[in-house]
Image (cartoon, rainbow, N blue to C red):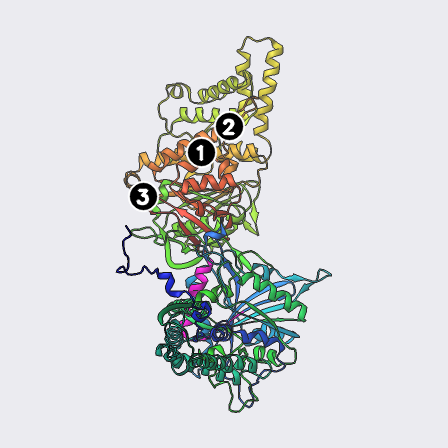
Amino acid sequence: MEVSNSNKRPSIRFEDLFHGIDPNTLVIDNPIQVPNSFYRELLDCSMERSYLDYVSERKAFPQKTGEAQPFKATWLQITRLPVHPDNSDSYDLFNRWQGVLSSLHAWGYRFLFLLQRREGKTHLYLGAMSSNPNFIASDAIEQVKEASSGSMPGVELRALTDMEAAMEINFPLQGYGCMGAVTGLPSFFSEKEPGVLQTLDSLAFGIRGTQNEDRPYSLLVIADPISDAGTNEIINKMRSIGSEIHSDVDRRVNLNESNSTSGQKGLNPYAAAEVSKMAGTGLGRLMGSLGAGIGTAIAPGFGTAIGQAVGNGAGRLLGSAAGVALGQLNKTTSSSFSLTVDTSYLDKYAQYAEELTEKHIERMKQGRNLGYWNVGVYVLGKNRKDVTTVNGMLRSIYSGRESYLEPIRLHVLNDMSGAMDIVRGGFNMIPLYNASADGMSEDVEWHVFGRNYQYLSTPMNTKELALTTSLPRRDVPGLRFVKTAVRFANNPPVTEGDTICLGKLVDMGVEQKNEYRIEPDVLVRHALVTGSTGSGKSTSGKRILKGLLEKKIPVLIIEPAKDDYVRWAMEMNRHLPHDMQFRIYMPGHTELNGKELNHLQLNPFEPAAVSGAKVDMTARCENLIALLNASLPTSDILPVLMDETVYNLYRGFYGEEFVNGFPMDQQEKYPTLDLLTKMAQLVMDKKHYEQKVKDNLMACLETRFQYLNRGTRGRLLAVKRSTDYNNLFSRPTVINISGISSAKDKALIMSLLMLSLYEYRKSIYENDAEYRSCADRNKLLHLTLVEEAHNVLMKPETDAGGTGNPQQVVADLFSNMLSEIRSYGEGLMIVDQVPTRLIPDAIKNTNYKIVHRMTAPDDCQVMAASLALREEQKALIPSLPVGHAIVYGDKDDAAAWVHLSL
């Protein structure tokens, strides 16, 4: 049976409601159009400043007439820049230069930077100028120098006189025939190392023509500081624009549509309100100001187009949008329904304009901290080709990997436009206003961001200006780089009592006010002075000796070569009191420059001692045997025979008293060298050798002993008595043995002098209670300076040929002396060019190290280790100027860089 369904409600699907409805009736036209053309013009004209694209086409720029030039430029030339001695990147020249510019901004002067290439050389100049009537040129120069020296220690600046400025700057600038300009914001390659790869090195190196001739050109940067108030004003204007833009970045439109039999179609009042808002509020006013300002201010030919695009174009868009919104009101449909549509519009131009505004604000906030400038970058050359080349080089320097805010633009200006007269005539920036327009002048503000944007220039913060004027970092002709950017101890050692001033402390290549002083008594623990020829070693030695003489401390100078100390001593004698005047000895010379010299005699057999003291004759005999064996070529049995000969000669003179080995009284007579041959014959007569062997050995001994009796060495050594040791070792003395030609002879003579000095100091210590008391308190009672010490203190080499090695004996003697003689009040100062040739104790067992310039890596390494230098400090040693040294002693906290006084 069928069940009736008459009471059931029919089933209607949702999609059935729209059957028969034409889909085209559901298409809703958007009456709201965001005027993105306006944002394109806002970006191009105000932020990216597209009006600068037409500058090269301009035929004339407005000139100042009827006004006296109020600006006067004063100049400094950078002649030397500091760099790190080992790694130029370790010296952050970019940030230091940024610090200089930040300091200059605080004074409010117009800053000038001139890189000039002429006559194959690069010249860097810094200038300052001001229209302030109270501007004093000398003060500006001093402040620029202070800022540069403070931020870049070691920089060398030369102040130019008015005549020098005219000859070096103004005249060359007048000789150029073409000019260009570079505008836009420079960007960096890396935030971590700003400016490292972006320096003016390539520009400073110069450009060459087809015939390899050097092309002259100049890069002139004019930077006007913008006050903090002016920077804030620009920031506020950008913030205001950013606020107006923000409402159009992401716009939502709500449309409610109702279709019914009455045929009415309703439009939400919100849409009309949006059109009204755009036409009448801030954004509309902003469009108007841009169109009116730029359209009339810029010269005809490229300003009119910009004004129309901004003003009229935006107006047309608004009118069209309103017409669409208020039209199309009547439509009919066969059914009734309602529909709500939400549409979101993202305007990419508005979004980018907002982002760009924020980035500009951020960089200007940096400028508010370090300084904000209006910067004109101008290139002058002989012709357009040279200017174009330099412009291209600058673009490669200024264009980094970061996204740009204002593109780098290159301009080559019309030769007859008057631009060069504006720039080189008074170092002014080129204005861009239309001089023919009614009411227009340089003082009229037509740019939305203010007058600083109305020149052929670019407002920059100090960081961007530092990149624009980034200093070269490599040597180029005309500009020197010194490797002095290293920190050393700034505090001198703590001293007590009367001291000797060595000189002034130096840090980062800059001489400080602090003096470096040493106490005389610290020299009793010895000193080593080293450095290459002409580096200032003698200056160091003379400075210390002079200080000791002023304190009545006697000195002995042993000079194996030259006569520098002899002449210095003669000059000193003119001012010293009689009891402190030098006695000068030069074997082989009786006079020098008309002045009679003292005669030196050294009897090798005579021990040194103070008057009335006993002497150790046995020790003298043993030391003399060692010296003779080392100084004369010997082999096989000869050393033994020479030992026996010397021993028997002493024994023949002093008998059993000598054999017993006890200290003896000083004698009236001593053996002499001429007796050695006779004694050798007696010794050989007692030997039971074959006659032929005897004859051969005797011939060998005779030859060697006679050698000692000949020539200058014979006149010095083959004597009966030595010069009074009190005169040699108790008053100022110079012994110059440059007249001795043989290195072995010099070694023997100096060995005898050292041996005698040691004996004398030991004798006076043991026999003079007052002297001993002072020595026990580590007082310096006498100083011996050994110049060119490698002649006698040579690091010994292994002698495999049995030819004798005098340096070995001297090395052993000197090593013992360094360890022991200080306890007798004697200080030794070793002066030499090559420290690695010296015996190890000369470096290890000396307290004060004074290191002048050296270039050999092994010498630098050895001395750097002894001075406890860091790697960058060690790298400075080959670059030390003459008269400068690195000094380190037991009273120093760390090594100090000292400019030694003359």
Judge depth for marks 3 and 1 and give the one in front: 1
Is residue 43 something one can see in this rendering? yes
- Foreground: disc 2 or disc 1: 1
The amino acid marked with disc number 3 is Lys
Q: Which residue is mark 2?
A: 672
Looking at the image, the residue that sits furthest to the front is 1
Of residue 64 and residue 272, the one placed in the foreground of this image is: 272
**Dominant SS type (magenta):** helix
The single residue placed furthest to the left in the displayed view is 7
Specify the segment rendered in magenta.
93-113
Say if mark 3 contacts mark 2, CB within 8 Å.
no
Q: Position of residue 852 (x, y in %)?
A: 48, 48
- The amino acid pointed to by label 1 is Pro
Q: Nearer the viewer, mark 3 or mark 2?
A: 3
Are the residues at dot 3 and dot 1 in contact (C-beta closer than 8 Å)?
A: no
User: Measured along the vertical axis of the image, is residue 258 above or below residue 567?
Assistant: below
Reply yes or no: does residue 98 show up in magenta. yes
Residue 782's place in the image compared with 179, above or below, is above
Identity, as a three-letter code, of the amino acid under mark 2: Thr
Percent of width and height locating residue 669: 45, 29
10 Å crowding of disc 3: few (<14), some (14-19), many (20+): many
Residue, x 65% and y 74% (percent of image)?
178
Which residue, given by chain and number where applicable, does mark 3 sit on?
A: 779
Label 1 Cα neighbours within 10 Å, binned few <14 / some 14-19 / many ≥20: some
Q: Secondary structure at mark 2?
A: loop
Q: Which residue matches tag 1? A: 840
Give the structural element (helix, strand or loop) at label 3. Answer: loop
